[in-house]
């Protein structure tokens, strides 16, 4: 039958060849498998070569296209200040600045950050010392275990730059995406108010 023929060879005639055909298939199969493996190894579509600007420095990375910015920071660059809390964008511990705006790095793909300027908690201070927000958190003891603190500080700096520091209620509203299991919220608000004054926004 026509539908049984592939390249003018029917299944019936191929099977009837028996021992003659099998060695040919056995010889071809390993070579085909080897070629496929080689191509898969060197041309994996899941790997992307990107350049990220982190804290003013350029970094060339080969990353899985599914890797988050948070994992790239922690696992590829050793910048462990940004914390992995919930890994679902609900706690704010992984907050970083991307082009001056706060972003949850656990929900941002590393490849999507290419061409942007990323600042992490490690890049917040400068040659003159701690950033005013970092110092304010120390002055007001605005942390206990400290796990959420990097994300709190990064969001707090953004909160000031966004102009959301007119009163305690507004600060709490615009910091509500950052959770503190130790409940240091009153101290955090006080720290933000102090830093805002020094940053010219109070």
Image (cartoon, rainbow, N blue to C red):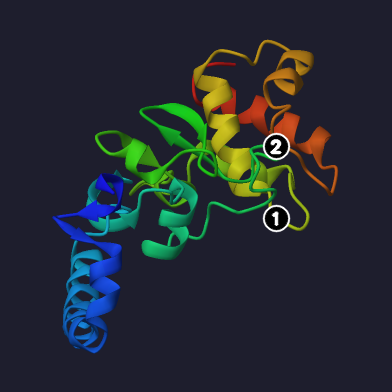
The residue that mark 1 highlights is 146
What residue do we see at 44% from left, 59% from top?
A: 79
Q: Secondary structure at mark 2?
A: loop
The residue that mark 2 highlights is 90
Residue 135 visible from this viewpoint: no
Neighbours of disc 1 within 10 Å: few (<14), some (14-19), many (20+): few
What residue do we see at 65% from left, 48% from top?
A: 149
Q: Mark 2 to mark 1: distance in Å? A: 17 Å
Q: Which of the two residues, 168 or 77, is positioned nearer the viewer here?
A: 77
Task: Find residue 51 and report its horizontal and vertical position in percent.
Answer: 22, 47
Is residue 55 toward the left or the right of residue 133 in the image? left
Task: Find residue 116 and report its horizontal and vertical position in percent.
Answer: 29, 33
Neighbours of disc 2 within 10 Å: few (<14), some (14-19), many (20+): some
What residue do we see at 54% from left, 16% from top?
A: 201
Query: Furthest-front residue in view?
Result: 1
Task: Find residue 92 and report its horizontal and vertical position in percent.
Answer: 65, 39
Figure check: 120 above or below 144? above
Q: Secondary structure at mark 1?
A: loop
Residue 31 visible from this viewpoint: yes
Is residue 99 toward the left or the right of residue 120 in the image? left
Q: Which of the two residues, 126 or 180, is positioned nearer the viewer here?
A: 180
Q: Which of the two residues, 192 or 25, is positioned nearer the viewer here?
A: 25
What residue do we see at 70% from left, 40% from top?
A: 91
Figure check: 80 above or below 141? below
Task: Find residue 127 and report its horizontal and vertical position in percent.
Answer: 33, 49
Is residue 88 toward the left or the right of residue 111 in the image? right
* Residue 34 placement: quadrant: bottom left
| Dots 2, 1 in contact, CB < 8 A | no
């Amino acid at each position: 039958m026509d539908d049984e023929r592939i390249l003018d060879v029917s299944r019936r005639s191929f099977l009837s060849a028996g021992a003659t055909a099998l060695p040919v298939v056995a010889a071809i199969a390993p070579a085909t498998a080897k070629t496929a493996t080689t191509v898969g190894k060197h041309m994996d579509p899941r790997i992307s070569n990107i350049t990220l600007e982190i804290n003013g420095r350029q970094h060339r990375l080969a990353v899985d296209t599914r890797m988050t910015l948070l994992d790239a920071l922690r696992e590829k660059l050793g910048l462990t200040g940004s914390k992995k809390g919930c890994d679902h964008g609900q706690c704010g511990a992984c907050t970083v600045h991307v082009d001056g705006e706060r972003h949850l790095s656990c929900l941002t793909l590393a490849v999507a950050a290419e061409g942007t300027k990323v600042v992490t908690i490690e890049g917040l201070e400068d040659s003159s010392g701690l950033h005013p927000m970092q110092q304010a958190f120390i002055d007001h003891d605005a942390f206990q275990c400290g796990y959420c603190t990097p994300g709190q500080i990064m969001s707090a700096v953004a909160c000031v730059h966004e102009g959301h520091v007119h009163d305690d209620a507004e600060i709490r509203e615009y910091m509500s995406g950052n959770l503190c299991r130790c409940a240091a919220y009153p101290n955090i608000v006080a720290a933000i108010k102090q830093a805002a004054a020094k940053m010219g926004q109070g």
